[in-house]
Amino acid sequence: MSVLMRDEAQTRAQLLDVRRYTIELDLTTGDETFDSVTVIRFATRADADTFVEVKPAELRSVTLDGQPLDPESLDGNRLPLKNLTAGEHELRVDAAMRYSRTGEGMHRFTDPSDGETYVYTQLFMNDVQRVFAAFDQPDLKSVFELTVKAPEGWTVLANGVTEHTDGLWKAAATPLISTYLVAVAAGPWHSVTTRHRGLPFGLHCRASLAPYLDTDADELFEITKQCYDRYHEKFDEPYPFDSYDQAFVPEFNAGAMENPGLVTFRDEFVYRSAVTDTERQTRAMVIAHEMAHMWFGDLVTLAWWDDIWLNESFAEYMGYQTLTEATRFTDTWTDFGVVRKGWGYDADQRPSTHPVAPDAVDDTASALLNFDGISYAKGASALRQLVAWLGEKDFLAGINTHFERHRFANATLADFIESLAAHTDRDVHAWADAWLRTTGVDTLTPTVTRGTDGTHTLRVEHTGSRPHRIAVGLYDLDVADEGRHLALRERLDLDVPQAEPQPIGKRPTLLLLNDGDLTYAKVRFDAHSFDGVSTALSGLPEPLSRAVVWNALRDAVRDGELPATAYLETARTHLPRETDLALVQGVLGFASTQVADRYLTPEQRPAALATLSALCRDLIRRTEDGDHPGLRLIAVRHYIDVAGHPEPIAGWLSDGTVPGGPELDPDLRWRILSRLAVLGETDEAAIAAELASDPSATGQEGAARCRAALPDPESKARAWDAMFNGDSLSNYLLTATAQGFWQPEQAELLQPYVARFYEDAVAVADRRGPAIADVLGRWAFPVHAVDPETLRLGEATLKNGDLIPALRRKLVDQLDDLGRALRVRQA
């Protein structure tokens, strides 16, 4: 059995007290495997049998209390420990372990830019077993001592400060932490270091990215220090580890991982090409999010995976809030509303939805599926609503009590609620039941009634079960010289469900529910307000208010209540005057990848792309003065992506610049070449020439994406073979190939592959595991094929009882989105 069951973990936690791991890793034994010797000192509280987990390439020897055990007794990933007597024990496991190419366990990467090799760990959930033997569950915390033998010229990073002596790297012993939080990153890193408040801080990346890290090091350290200081103002408990390293590592599956003392990030955050300030804000938010985990998750850790939200929702909320309070990025909640909240709303309306805090997660495979928009975005939204309802003072007091009670230990939802309850008279238990134990998205709809005296009252119709504390914005039209603007008359605080109708006086041009975006709910407009939106959306004074409106329009399209073409018309009218980069990016993204690619029919799509091209041209013209480089970059990117004809983007590529700027950096060059490949206006020779000029890892991915996008049978066959008939592609190269393969413009050429996807994806997922299954379900699914036959084939596949959970979850979600797209088209 490869997964750990909840009841097994509870039994083992009652039996064991795990004292210390002493781990020796040898990274000099070749390209395929490394050596791992683990000594675990533990005590049992009674006579019993148990097991330890390990996934070796070769299990050389095992000894328990000095007596050899049979390596052949290993059953899957479980090594049985039989007839243990109560008292102290020592287990020694000597094994060769495989390097990973999928971002799981000990991932190995050779940089095509310079031939240098790097390895790093990602040990989440079940993957510590790929690196060393362990009692692998979060509530068996222990001290970890780590020694690493690495090739000459390498630097080894770990959870604690490392020292290099006699060819070995030794890390300082950790405090009590969970197995999944142990971390190693080794290679010829380029490092930038400083100190802050007595602790060493470091930034690390591969050598080929050194110039780009050096350019941003001051900004990265400034954000890190500002967040660190703000958390120390919020939390009574000081930062609990001996150093703070941030390593930007290649081919990382997540955005980042909160390993104590050694946070790992995907190294796309070391920017090789121009980015917008919103993208810098996103990177800063990830830094703040992962630092929050040092307390939420690392100091106090969930007891089992049903409380994932205690890690992720808190880090998500704290990341956005702390960034707003402590850094130059003071408008982060707009980005949250545009990007993250839609992720949560979408996930919460699919069959795979689950409560923020589910009653029970039976095993680790099921738990892995819950790292989604609900555990992150919905949970963070719930916490934002909790703070609005409870008050920040009592909220922070409860958090600090929680840290004090459970430091270097484990805690549950019940523990957290008790910590909050100690500081308020409000019924936080009832709040938790309503918000954390339920599924789905409530809908709030205004009804405005005119009285006999000419004044108006508001009642909010509430579809759903949760209580909401919201603000209601009343906006009146102000026709100024520059155009139509909406002026805020009043912002009302309202509890929903309402006891009595709310007087609002004169009917406003726009009545906006959830103004300020403090709750998690879909909102609708009355007819009069919808007219106001259509006329003056871009005239709303605050970007967060505009984000609430755009989200409401997005939800209405997805629910079949607003024609997709109407969304495009609204974007065409108002986006050229938008100033917030997150809003422009979010609206263009939804309009192109959902509205044009899925919700409109193939016959409607060319007109939609033409509309989007015209919109982007307006933005490009508006930014010719050079005062809005971020807005111009977004417009140029999207103009490339929706180009229906090769001109003028082929001319840009030939000239190396967009007229008036920007000059084409590697990202823009690959983006243009990819679109030209889709349109059949480039070839293998041009792709090879571009790769020769940019032989980096990103260049390799760009070339794979372009080759898979070429519209000829031979190119499609080669790409399919690489994805499904061989296992040589890394997680990133597989993603790039899948991104290039399916194109709406090539529907006829691709039709034979739609049915093949299901059978071939099942086989590859079985062979390569959950990380690759996630890639296949997310990127290799034929999203362009919005037709009943695609849905029928997928539903038939779901009847296969042998699908691994990661692939099943992705297929369930994709098929639900496909069914929604069909309903939107019919509506």
Image: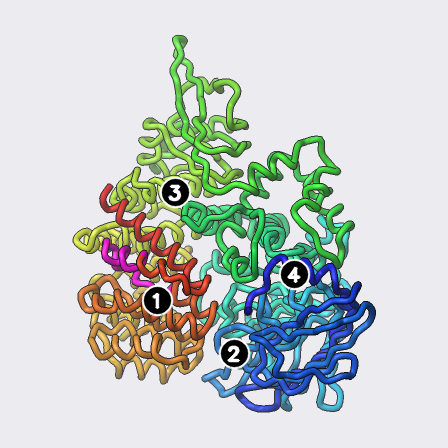
Stretch of the chain drawn in magenta: 778-795
Q: Amino acid at mark 1?
A: Ala
Q: Is residue 787 found inside the magenta-colored segment of the image?
A: yes
**Label 4: few (<14), some or many (≥20) within 10 Å?**
many
Residue placed under numbered mark 3 in the picture: 550
Indicate yes or no whether the magenta region holds residue 449.
no
Q: Are marks 2 and 3 in contact (CB under 8 Å)?
A: no
Query: In terms of sequence position, does the residue under pointer 2 or pointer 4 come before the other?
Result: 4
Corner quadrant of residue 30: bottom right
Q: Give the number of the disc on residue 617.
A: none
Mark 3 is on which residue type?
A: Trp
At x 52%, y 41%, the residue is 438
Of tags 1 and 3, which is closer to the observer? 1
Q: Judging from the image, what secondary structure is the residue with disc 3 in?
A: helix
Residue at which label 4 appears: 9
Badge 4 or badge 1: first in the primary sequence? 4
Marks 2 & 4, CB-CB < 8 Å contact: no
- Residue annotated with mark 2: 100
Residue 154 pos. (x, y %):
63, 85
Q: Tell me which label, 1 or 2, sits earlier in the chain.
A: 2
Kindly tell me whether residue 487 is visible in this rendering.
no
